[in-house]
Amino acid sequence: MNMPSKHLEQLVEHFSSLPGIGKKTALRLVLNLLKRDDKEIETFASDLAEMHEKISTCEVCSNIADGSLCAICSQNSRKREVICVVEDIRDIMAIEATEQYYGVYHVLGGVISPMDGIGPHDLNIDDLVNRVATGEVDEVVLALNPSMEGDTTNFFLYRKLADYEVNVTTLSRGVAVGTELHYTDELTLGRSILNRLPFDMNLVRK
């Protein structure tokens, strides 16, 4: 793709480096930005430049936050005795959209995947165990994507929490196998949360 401007080409390269954005989409985005007024571009660039400085990680659950605690952990109305374990923040957003869950969360930051070189030590598992070890948690909901990697991680977490007096549950299988949680429609996901079941290690795919 021949570009009439070197700077335009560089911007297209930056945008196309983002997931799901090809060169044509990147060019369309950059051309759209060229039509914006200077003030709007300045604000856009400033927010982007300050992203790493102003956006942090919640010290309790590892959700995205503007301070030491995320918006969910800051709410006194949440049921702190129930922790929902998710892979990343997109799953929190999907579950929150159902308006069917009132506990708190724990973001693992991924799932166990030997093929990708990701092991238990690469995930935020120790902090979860420490939260349960306080004795203030009644239930841990395993809400990982229904995949082989998700099931493997569920099984590992179940074994790690076996020594503690905590109920370990999982979403009902209303969520289709192989589906990423944040792409599931709100009604199906909401029902899966409400109808969660005790975790059964015998159902983990071999």
Image: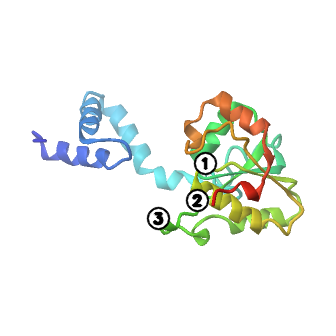
Q: Position of residue 179 (x, y in %)?
A: 56, 42
Earlier along the polypeptide chain: callout 3 or callout 1? 3
- The part of the image, by quadrant, that contains residue 8 is top left
Amino acid at the residue labelled 2: Val
Along the line of sight, the residue nearer the viewer: 28 or 111: 111
User: Is there a contact, CB below 8 Å, between mark 3 and mark 1?
Assistant: no
What's the amino acid at mark 3? Asp
Give the side of residue 94 with respect to residue 116, left or right: right
Q: Amino acid at mark 1?
A: Asn
Mark 3 and mark 2 lie on one chain; the one further toward the N terminus is 2
The residue identified by callout 3 is 116
Estimate the x, y position of residue 143 in percent, counting from the top left.
68, 48
Give the residue drawn at x 85%, y 69%. 163
Q: For mark 3, does the 10 Å Cα neighbourhood hold few (<14), some (14 to 19), or many (20 or more) residues?
A: few
The residue where tag 2 is placed is 111
Tell me the SS state at disc 3: helix
Disc 2: CA contacts within 10 A as few (<14), some (14-19) or many (>=20): many
Check whether the beta carbons of the residues at disc 2 and disc 1 lie within 8 A of each other.
yes
Location of residue 125 in the rendering, given as x and y in whole percent from the top left corner: 68, 65
Q: How many marks?
A: 3
Label 2 vs label 1: CA separation? 9 Å
Question: Mark 1 — residue?
Answer: 145
Kindly indicate the quadrant of the structure image that contains residue 205: bottom right
Q: Is residue 187 left or right of residue 17?
A: right
Q: Is residue 97 visible?
A: yes
Is the residue 170 above or below the residue 120 in the image?
above
Residue at 59 percent across and 44 percent down: it is 177
